[in-house]
Image (spheres, coloured by chain):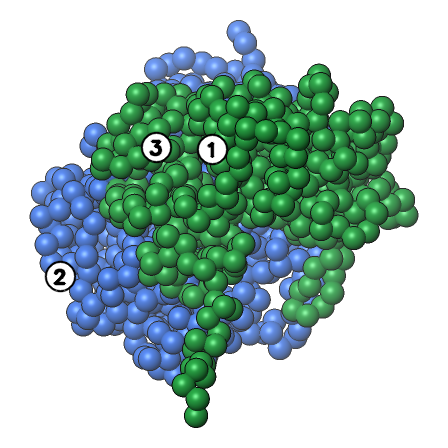
Amino acid sequence: MTSNLMTSHEAYTNEHGKLSPFHERQAERNVRGAWAEWNGYKFAEYYYDAQYEYFCVRNQCGTYDISPMQKYMIEGEQALAMLNRMVTRDLAKCKVGRAMYTVWCTEEGRLIDDGAVFRLADDKYMLTCGAPMIAWLRRAKLGFTNVTVTDVTDDIAALSIQGPTSYSVLRTLNLTGDDALETLKLFDVREFTFNGKPITVSRTGFTGDLGYELWVDPAHAIELWDAIYAQQDNYGVHPYGEAATDMLRIEAGFIMPFVDFNEAHKTIHFRHDHSPLELNLDWLVNFKKPMFNGKKALLEEAKTGPEYRLVKLDIEGNKPAEEAWLYADKNCTKEIGYVTSAMWSPVAKANIALAMVKPDALKGDIYAEIYYTQELRQKMKVAKCELKDKPFWAPERARAVPPFQY
Amino acid sequence: MKQYDAIIIGAGHNGLTNAAYLAKAGLDVLVLEKNDYIGGAAVTRELEQGFKYSNCSYVCSMMRQAIHRDLDLARHGLVLVPYLGTVNFGDQLNDVLVDYPNESAGYNEWRRRNPHDADSRHRFETDLARYAQLIRKTLLRTPPDPTSFKPRDIHELLWLGKTFFSIGEKQLYEYIRFFTMSATEFLEEYFDDPLIKAAMASPGIIGTALGVDSPGSAYILLHHVMGDVDGNIGAWGLARGGMGAISNALMSAAKSHGAEVRTNSGVAQVLVENGKAAGVVLENGDELRSKIVVSNLDAKRTFTKIVDRKDIPERIFKQASNFKIRGSSGKVNIALSGLPKFIGVPDNRYINRGGQGFCGSLKTMEKAYDCWKRGTWSDDPFIESVIPSVWDPTVAPPGQHWMSNFIQYCPHELADGPWTPEKRDAFADSVINKIERYSPGFKDLIIHAEVRTPFEIENEVGLTEGNIFQGELTIDQLLFNRPFPGYSQYRMPVKNMYMCGSSTHPGGGVSSACGANAAREILMDLKKANTVPEDDFYDE
Ligand SMILES: Cc1cc2nc3c(=O)[nH]c(=O)nc-3n(C[C@H](O)[C@H](O)[C@H](O)COP(=O)(O)OP(=O)(O)OC[C@H]3O[C@@H](n4cnc5c(N)ncnc54)[C@H](O)[C@@H]3O)c2cc1C
């Protein structure tokens, strides 16, 4: 027997997900061993029960590990110029200490990804997004001197804390900084000190509720976790995973890659990817900017109108319209679109969905053809849909400054 | 003098629901409430600073989702949160049955006690769900009058017949048998384990002047498991902010449609002129006029207290006087400086924090019933508890809690004379001592307690004899017999007068169904377009 033969355990090492800086604690809480993966990290699908975790966020608060999210530092004199050439929004308007949600497109005006840009200093930005972007960033950097792009994904531990009691929990951490935590507005980013260590706090999130994202050195991740969880009996903190996140973000009206849209670089079929206009993200596209990637194509599209529009629907009955076709008539003869995300919303008490609909059909009736099963029998029903322009969940507390304290 | 289209007496959740739907149809509506707060038995009050008790009802499952949605109660501030991880305690300390939310954990817990019961549970739950499904379908419908030849009644009777026959002949006979069974008999068909039987039987006695061995208690059991939270049939939830959040949201919805709500306005008498209701006289003597009058009070109170005997047929006065509305429940709401720990419960953060059922055994429960029959309370009562503050950050200060304890049984009239503050405290001691037995140190956590016997419930909420359902849920007082045969369609023996409280179909519980059903009938009489939605079903 040769000595370099791997034991069976080692032989599978590469197939095990990477562990997040919070893993040790999260593993203790993952009672059901319900793990998924995200960007190579081992990542919780849920910890105890998805519905329970969803309610923790809407009623108390929850923490969501965003360490696997991709993070890039873009620094240098031309950082702004480079990023502004890449994304659709005008980042010149993003002051130091602010963050912006934005998208970036191909030359054809199709969405590569969405994400957030945090302006940490005059010439220093952090870009975060769901999928790896280093290859695109390298291309976006071409022609710009004096700018560096660094992948800091593994160098920052990031934890999202969301829900009505999130502020009350953070208050107990006694963060010190130039500005008080309570003064943070939605999309503000500030540096603080936590137990003598630097921590960045942004009032951002993916739930539509009051919430923050915390960014620290991975070496301090467990200390941060423990300080937060020391409050679990006072404010009901609970970790939540991907399943609850998906419910929360649909209620908030946020889109998810490969659910509501296809990333352009990963789409084989012509036009199976999406433009920001199709996704109803016109507000993110700043045509006044001199130049940005996809501008020409998007200008063209703005003139002729997009092929589809992403809309919010409130659907009759309570059967989630998952993967439903949409029609202009009750008999389902004139097809006008399809549902991308659907759920029964426990807080809004509504049968909600995000859907792609042909723009000229938006003035008329919309019906969904919903399939479901009842004790193994296939059933179908046609349900009337109502267009909604506001998110299904947008409580006042999400924006209140100072935040409400418990 | 101003004439309202409708005056609703009582701002209980059903009165407010009724007001919302009448106002939505464009009627000029006034709600009159005797207390200085609204909500009736669906109420939240801060009696000790920082602690918000759900003083009467404490958990929610019957609330019609269709109404929650239709009146947009979410926008009016209502969030229902399901809770999980209830623990049941046997007679012996350390004998604990955990209701795990996870199916396989639950199976293992039962199997550990009794493999037969763990298996039998599946059949039990399936049978119960089949029965519940039928009853659920009747909740937002007006019961047919079986003696009427009106097309609508015949149509509704046929629907009812068809619905019930749809389960198959054999099952239908089982179902009919079920209506007259005791909880004990019903459970004996499925289970052996004493604690499992006791835990499963406990919903059969809540609010009821029946024992686990009394015929009819099986139906009460069903009444308590037919609700749902977001389609999880049998699940119970908490209203964020306490049960008063439901009434507050309903009031806000009613007001948004133009209804007016006045508190401190007890009604002394319904004005009847030429055989028709014409308005009300308040306790302060003020007279208010309206085209119709709707009573949210229970049937006995309505027809023996606020309607003049000479204005109604003598038969109705007799029936109202004899209406079965015996009070049998108490409530002790306790503010706690910390979270109590219970003997024998694993220190698992999920199961230690749901509800607690101090059920003991069928024998213990039946013994408590015997005490009630003798006009006293048991020193070993059945208590159903929940600690809402574990879930709801708005009802207690951080780290502190309040515990809702519902006690079955507590008599309305004591054998040794009227209730006194001393007797009330002695009743509370029986409850606190029992909890202390299962949770040593519990007493030291107590900051404040509100004790409610049927006497307080009657005097504060106006529920006659303190009956929590506005009338017992026995077959002689259900469906087309509720409140009285011939008067199940919300119209009362006085013209232009209606009832909308839990004394009417489908009965007690925070459901909004009685108020909504009454609104539909009223709008039909007024030839107005119906504003009340149809129910939505998960089990369609
Ligand atoms: C202790 C207790 C625990 C319960 N637990 C639960 C539970 O956990 N879950 C559940 O679903 N149900 C529960 N119930 C039952 C449920 O609360 C009731 O069935 C329901 O709230 C009744 O609503 P209602 O609108 O029909 O009548 P009520 O709530 O009785 O409303 C009647 C209203 O009329 C007012 N009123 C009385 N007399 C007059 C007058 N002369 N003039 C003006 N106003 C007057 C009263 O003050 C009251 O506001 C409980 C009830 C009690 C008492």
Q: Residue furthest top?
A: B1
Residue B434 placement, left or right of A249: left
Q: Position of residue B358 (x, y in %)?
A: 25, 61
Chain of the residue under label 2: B
| Residue A204: mark in rendering | 1
Q: Residue at x 60, y 60 (%)?
A: B134
Chain B, hue in figure: blue
Which residue occupies the foreground of this view, B396 or A311? A311
Mark 2 sits on what residue?
Answer: B437
Mark 3 sits on what residue?
Answer: A167
Chain A, hue in figure: green
Asked which secondary structure carries label 2, the reply is helix
Asked which secondary structure carries label 1, the reply is loop
Three-letter residue code for mark 2:
Arg
Q: Position of residue A161 (x, y in %)?
A: 40, 40
Chain of the residue under label 1: A
Frontmost of labels 3 and 1 is 1
| Quadrant assignment, res A62 | top left
Q: Tell me how far mark 3 sits from mark 1, CA to CA.
A: 12 Å
Q: Residue at x 37, y 14 (%)?
A: B285
Frontmost of labels 2 and 1 is 1
Chain of the residue under label 3: A
Q: Position of residue B244 (x, y in %)?
A: 38, 34
Three-letter residue code for mark 3:
Tyr
Q: Residue at x 67, y 50 (%)?
A: A258
Q: Tell me how far mark 3 sits from mark 2, CA to CA.
A: 38 Å
Which residue occupies the foreground of this view, B376 or B31? B31
